[in-house]
Image (spheres, rainbow, N blue to C red):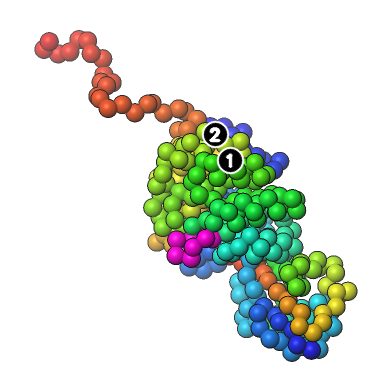
Amino acid sequence: MKLKVNGKDTETSAATIMALWQEETADLELESNRGYAISLNGKVVRKAQWDTTPVSENDQVEIVRAMQGG
Amino acid sequence: MTASDTFTIAGVELSSRLFLGTAGYPNQSVMVEAVEASECEVVTMSIRRISLDKRGSDTVNLLMNYRFLPNTAGCETARDAILTAELAREALDTNWIKVEVIGNRETLYPDAIELLEATRHLVDEGFVVLPYCTDDPVMCERLADAGAAAVMPLGSLIGSGMGVVNPANIELICRRSQVPVIVDAGLGTASDATIAMELGASAVLLNTAVAKADDPVAMAAAMMHGVKAGRLAHLAGRIPKRGRAEPSSPQFGLVGS
């Protein structure tokens, strides 16, 4: 299945936001998802709903983090 | 000035009148030291797409004991600012948001129209909105009417270090505003922060002036003192300016007269 993740065409087998999150951040060795957030087609998906929110072909997903800023 | 000289934003009492940005420091440990030296309670953060090739720094965990004020820096439309604010709320568990909508990439000047729209929308969604805005008294009034919890007029262009370029406007805004006024952007050194506070600001928000100073930790301390001095001078009530000399020593009993 093809998705747009952070503006990039991404091929994934993830069926849910949670699976996509795990796939996309596997290399980052994160201890928690504090400071992170995800939107699906312009709507924020609450962390509690990541497990139960499905992703489908051509969905637009943004995975963001809080970082230094002014 | 006593320990009780606090101010309140959306029911939260703040005793530090300095908000500090967390970007652009030589490294994370200098950033943390500068935040500590500034005695601030509120730190600003940005929201960005994750970079999948590197972990990046862990600003959130380093500053866990501070109140986060995420921003919508870089957004050029109300729509993007709203989504960024919603993502920030989810990422940082706070409904406070510094709304920044840029109208021009070169000047980074706020887009008043998009800003007002974003402010209205986010207030409706229950956010505590602190808009970064122009030093225009009418704009500040409109934002407060729209429900902004504070207004944050610019001292001068972001990162410019020019200080408060229109003190008359800042003074006017501070005198008339129904919500706290936080002078944001453009301050370059401690005296700039002092001037903003003397003009009646409730607080200042700084980043570049501290982060890019030769010694960011020392500048953070200088800013802390500058803010306190300005606040104290504002409360003390300065003498009026006049165009002629006024001797301070007694005029009688002059030697040789």
Closest to the observer: B120 or B25? B120
Count of numbered tags: 2
Closest to the observer: B56 or B96? B96
Q: Main secondary structure of the magenta part?
A: loop
Helix, strand or loop at disc 2? helix
Extreme residue in the front direction? B113
Q: Residue at x 73, y 77 (%)?
A: A60
Spatial CA span between label 1 and label 2: 8 Å
Judged left or right of residue B120, residue B183 is left
Q: Which residue is drawn at 50% across and 30% down?
A: B235
Disc 2 marks a residue whose amino acid type is: Arg
Tell me which segment is drawn in magenta. B102-108
Closer to the observer: label 1 or label 2?
1
Extreme residue in the left direction? B256
Judged left or right of residue B242, residue B87 is right
Q: How crowded is mark 2: few (under 14 residues within 10 Å), some or many (20 or more)?
A: some
Please, which chain is the residue tagged with disc 1 on?
B
Q: Where is residue B54 in the image (x, y as percent from the top left)?
A: 62, 80
Helix, strand or loop at disc 1? helix
Asked if residue B106 is among those painted magenta in the image, a careful observer would answer yes
Q: Residue at x 52, y 41 (%)?
A: B137
Q: Residue B176 carries which label?
A: 2
Q: Residue at x 63, y 60 (%)?
A: B78
Q: Identify the residue position indicated by label 1 in the image.
A: B141
Residue B153 vs A69, above or below: the answer is above
Please, which chain is the residue tagged with disc 2 on?
B
